[in-house]
Amino acid sequence: MTLTTCIFDAYGTLFDVTAAAKECAFEPGRLKLKSCWKNLANDWRSKQLQYSWIHTITNSYVSFWEITQNSLDFALEANNLEGDKELRERLLSLYWTLKAYPEVLTVLKNLQLANIEIAILSNGSKDMLNAAAKSAKIDHLLGGILSVDLIKTFKPDFRVYDLVLKNFNCKKSEVLFVSSNGWDVAAAAGFGFNVAWVNRNNDPVDKLPWRPKNILSNLTDIFNLVKEYD
């Protein structure tokens, strides 16, 4: 079996979702945020996921950008930072230019040199994803950016993973799907993709029907993993 296509989740996989809170926290005059930025980043991310799942289950789709704003409002209040409009706007602005993890550029370049199709499949809004990819200088390496905006439902709905087959000339068995989210990897495996879980935090494997065959601490070994399928 040969892999022809490598599909990456975006947030937490290619782009560091804690980067906005961290960068903002170390700007002048941010002492209060500096003391709690890790908690704020975690609250922001967990609510993003929870809200996306609720909107999927209740068939009440809104853009990921709206979810991002609503989840930040929760996180700010949870950390006693509500009411600071300037801080809110600064954090939201930084989310459009999240930093990529250090190994991302090299990994994508190696995959491109090996003629592997590379794309993003994300719950993120298309304009958010385009901005992040351009800011991280990886946009020229991508063969596509697939957003759930196309079908107006979020992962882990199987229709999201089916976007890959509809947009690329490949079979499920030819796809390696890469994500840092255990639930995302499990769903992609259930759909029929080969999967790799980027377990950056050394978390236990989710207790779900589908489990990742490949578990990595970061993206560095993705290229070698793809070649193992030749």
Image (spheres, grey):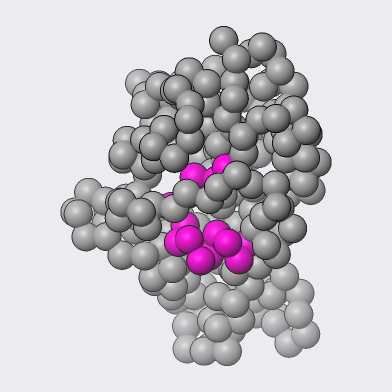
Q: Give the residue at x 53% y 50%.
A: 145
Q: Residue furthest left?
A: 58
Q: Give the residue at x 69% y 21%.
A: 225
Q: Number of labelled discs?
A: 0
Q: Is residue 37 above or below residue 215?
A: below
Q: Position of residue 142 (x, y in %)?
A: 64, 47
| 165 left or right of 115 in image | left
Quarter of the rendering occupied by the C terminus: top right
Q: Which of 188 and 175 is in front in this view?
A: 175
Q: Give the residue at x 74% y 44%.
A: 104
Q: Can residue 36 be seen in this view?
A: no
Q: Position of residue 59 (x, y in %)?
A: 19, 54
Q: Give the residue at x 55% y 47%.
A: 144
| 75 left or right of 38 in image | left
Judge whether residue 114 is colored magenta.
no
Q: Nearer the viewer, residue 168 or 56?
A: 168
| 111 left or right of 187 in image | right
| 161 left or right of 44 in image | left
Magenta extent:
119-132
Q: Is residue 101 visible?
A: yes
Q: Residue furthest front?
A: 169
Quarter of the rendering occupied by the N terminus: top right
Indicate the quadrant where residue 16 lies: bottom right
Q: Where is residue 76 in the image (x, y as percent from the top left)?
A: 49, 75
Indicate the quadrant where residue 109 lies: top right
